[in-house]
Image (cartoon, rainbow, N blue to C red):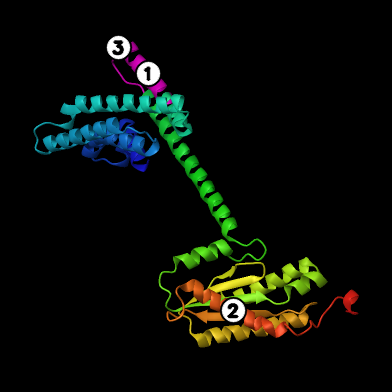
Amino acid sequence: MGVYIITMGSWLIGESEILQFITRNTYYVTRIPLLAILVCPISINLYIKETITIKKKLSVNIIATLTVINALICWLLEFFSILSITDLLIVSLGLISLTCIHYVAIFFIEAIVYKNERAQKEFMAISIFLVFLLIEIALFYINGQKKNSYFMLIGMSIYIVLMIYFQVDDYRKIKEIIKEKTFYEKMAYTDALTGAHNRARYNEHMKSIDNFEGITILQADTDRLKYINDNFSHFHGDQAIVQTYKVLNKHLENIAQVYRIGGDEFSAILQNVDREEINKIINQIRQDSEIINAKSEYDFSISIGVAEFDSAIDKNIYFTAIRADQQMYENKKRHRNTKPQKFPATNLDL
């Protein structure tokens, strides 16, 4: 589209005599419109190929090839002072006419027959130009072929402005589509309650790991969730799950993503993290959990299990995750024979 606009714009500036105010170089003033005429069909055919999805592009390729050959021949003949570009202008104009007829025909078919919205806009713009072109031709013959008017240039100017507007509008729509796609993709891979990555994203991450060496799986679980739900309401149960995620993410976000893989279960995939560093993080998580517990209406704590991939016992990374899960449940057993310390006032007699 950019090449197309530049080419047509160069021809417009040259024909409208604006170029002489930009440069005093006579060669440029006289040659730029001629060069634009030579390459104009090339840019138009490239634009057709990029803009309209047509099954058979043979005709477009043939016209574009003929135009390239014509441009090369004209440049070579002028370079070797055999003929000037103006001497072969009739051939170039013929190719432009052929290109324009082909252009209008394709966009007419796409707009009318196939109801192509983009082609309908394009056809409207070219139709405006053709109306001004017909006026130009009519006045040329009415005036006895003595002088040209500026109707064709006006039509071309309107056409270029409309094309730029359509392109900007298309760009805006593409941005909206990308924005919507990003939003729905985020919705598909984000847990609504916590904002963590969900099970689907976790599964993708696990499948994408092709080298298991150095991978450590951390599994975490909110303790006594049933007790919280039964005695303090599901609202407080959800609150406990969110608190679990916040504590985990606070200490893991710089080295790993935290995934909510189940109701109150979370997982993190760590790569090349020293076990001493992991133990330090686990202690920090437990310290923060104790602070939250001291302030909460209910007992709050997090059970954690960690396992590093070991090729001697793990067939793949999923076996590592199972070992981390088993360690986490071993950790949870500390609550098995103990009673919660906090209950609502109505449950004090229990």
Local secondary structure at mark 2: helix
Q: Is residue 343 left or right of residue 14?
A: right
Q: How far across and how far down the image is residue 120, in percent?
A: 46, 29
- Residue 230 marker: none
Report the residue marked by disc 1.
134
Q: What range of the chain is rendered magenta? A: 128-150
Distance from disc 3 to disc 2, alpha carbons, whole Å, reads: 97 Å
Earlier sequence position, callout 1 versus callout 2 = 1
Asked if marks 3 and 2 touch (Cβ < 8 Å), the reply is no
Q: Residues within 10 Å of mark 1 (few under 14, many from 20)?
A: few
Question: Where does the image place residue 307, in percent across and percent down from the top left?
Answer: 52, 80
Q: Earlier in the sequence, mark 3 or mark 1?
A: 1
Q: Which mark is residue 144?
A: 3
> Looking at the image, which residue is at 26% across and 40% down?
24
Callout 3–callout 1 Cβ contact below 8 Å: no
Query: What kind of residue is marked 3?
Result: Gly
Residue 218 image point, x, y percent: 56, 77
Which residue is the site of mark 2?
A: 326
- Which callout, 3 or 2, points at the residue further toward the start of the chain? 3
Mark 3 surroundings within 10 Å by alpha-carbon count, few (fewer than 14), some (14 through 19), many (20 or more): few
Can you tell which of label 3 and label 2 is closer to the viewer?
A: 2
Taking depth in this image into account, of 341 and 197 the one nearest to the observer is: 341
